[in-house]
Amino acid sequence: MIWMSELPPYIPFFLAALLVLVTHGNVRNIILLATPVLGGLHLWLDVQPFVPMVATDVLVTAKELSYQVTVFSYQLEFMRVDKLSLLFGYLFHIASFIAIVYALHVRDTIQQVAGLLYAGSALGAVFAGDLITLFIFWEGLALSSVFLIWARRSERSINTGIRYLIFQVMSGVLLLAGALTYYHQTGSTEFNYIGIESTAGWLILLAFGIKSAFPFLHNWLTDAYPESTPTGTVFLSAFTTKVAVYALARGFPGTDLLVYIGAAMTCFPIFYAVIENDLRRVLAYSMINQVGFMVCGIGIGTALALNGAVAHAFNDVIFKGLLFMTMGAVLYRVGNINGSDLGGLYKSMPKTALLCIVGASSISAFPLFSGFVSKSMVMTAMLQEGHNYLWLMLLFASAGVFHHAGIKIPYFAFFHHDSGIRVKEAPNNMLIAMMIAAVLCIFIGTQPQYLYALLPWKVDYWPYDMTHVLAQLQILFFSALAFVWLNKQGLYPPELRSVNIDFEWSYRKLLPAIARVSYNLLHAVNNGATRVVQQSWQGFQLIFQASRLSKYHLASSWPTGSMVLWIGLILGGYLIVDVYFLYIDDH
């Protein structure tokens, strides 16, 4: 059955997760490795789009190849294939294979099952043809991925995972609300171009924005990813944000607002990454920076920009995964990932250091590495559409990437002062996974035509012309020169054991503090008002009891007497008001 084109590509991952629960040892490892390999071959050989993508704002889908089910009054499409979904399908099979190889030494059923369910949910999301099906897999991503954070089994990871889950579930609730509103407005839940011309569009954009780590909605990523296990972070880096990028490319191409949001995303993480001591947290900020380039490309909406966005998503999964793997290997061997405590590791982990340099070169967009062939597409499209000031922001962001990811990561981990730490090289399975990613970084960087052939929109572009190459080399050269000069002058932010305050401080510390102060203030006001009312009432009772009226026989039973008293007061008040209005009418 696996070779039937109608079989949704996420089914093998869900079946494998069940088999992993009841197997052990080599049998389990074979199942883990075979799942992405056989699934990828099935996708490559048997699943083909019938309708090519075209360079328009609205994506053309392939209705001939779909698997639909009617639930209540909703038409659910569990498999919709076109070149956009296929590209991400190929990517997620490659990413899951690399992550599984990297984690082969792990003997943790929870992580292995969660990783398979997480990859399967990502595949389900990119092949979903309607918003309800997308919501199902959207929540599957949240529920499966949180166990990769909790798998570290520390108090901090548990608390972080809870905060992470709150954000992810919030995104799902917004998506469901948007889907139902969209159905009410249009009578359809089909997932194609949505736009922001309606309330439903804004709700869905916000849902996608949370998972894309838009500004002020980004701290779930920088908070959670560094707290996951060394292997779990590799899975996390591959799927959630890239599913969100896919969803934006499907539902909101050409939305101008995304250009500005993306430009902000490319710039603000740089300042945090430069001063951050935890090197995996540096990479988490760097991930937001790279997603910003993708969001810019989607916002521009031309064929070149959209191709650049999805191509950069493809490359980012591989080179960012490579960097997370190298830092995960350091954490696995050393037990620490703070830049202030590392240095000199190239002596005992030379292979990991070399592979880290490959990842750093790729994310920095060095010519002949994968980042160069995709990032330049977005930069070129930005200039073509006349966004000159935003292009300068992206230029600054490119230089910043080289500072915090291209130089800082390998320098402070492997080549800074000799910390005296001597450990073993990374395990063989980790090295193999890192080598696969490094080879792909170099292959795509030197032979980009193979990646370009998979892109959804037809466009004529070649990155290796003299202008692009020289401009990029100049940026990299002057960025490196600035790094060296700042270090020599003692102006570069030192690696310190510190806690950096980001926007998350507002909802982790500030808002709870305001809530406590507000509660205490309201509680005090309520108590004071209650005392005043009680004292006033008691005084009134004393005055009443001392009066002749209290001797009246109806007052001998206080409830009855009070009822008669209040009825008398109300009727008297009504009579006075009635007489007043009669007087007004007469005059």
Image: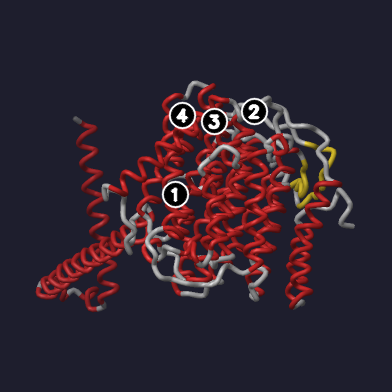
Residue bearing the label numbered 1: 407
Q: Residues within 10 Å of mark 1 (few under 14, many from 20)?
A: some
Quick one: label 1 or label 3, which is nearer the N terminus?
Answer: 1
Residue 462 circle label = 2
Residue type, numbered disc 1: Ile
The image quarter containing residue 552 is: bottom left
Residue type, numbered disc 2: Trp
Quick one: label 1 or label 4, which is nearer the N terminus?
Answer: 4
The image quarter containing residue 186 is: top right
Gap between marks 1 and 4 measured at Cα: 23 Å
Which is nearer the eye, 554 or 10?
Answer: 10
Nearer mark to the viewer, of 2 and 1: 1
Residue bearing the label numbered 4: 391
Residue 523 shows in this picture: yes
Give the residue displayed 58% in from the left and 64% down from the top.
232
Q: Residues within 10 Å of mark 2 (few under 14, many from 20)?
A: few
Give the residue displayed 29% in from the left and 73% down from the top.
560
Quarter of the image containing the C terminus?
top left
Quick one: label 2 or label 1, which is nearer the N terminus?
Answer: 1
Asked which colour scheme the image uses, the reply is: secondary structure
Residue bearing the label numbered 3: 469
Residue type, numbered disc 4: Trp
Residue type, numbered disc 3: Val
Quarter of the image containing the N terminus?
bottom right
Please state if 146 lies on the left or on the right of 78 as rendered. left
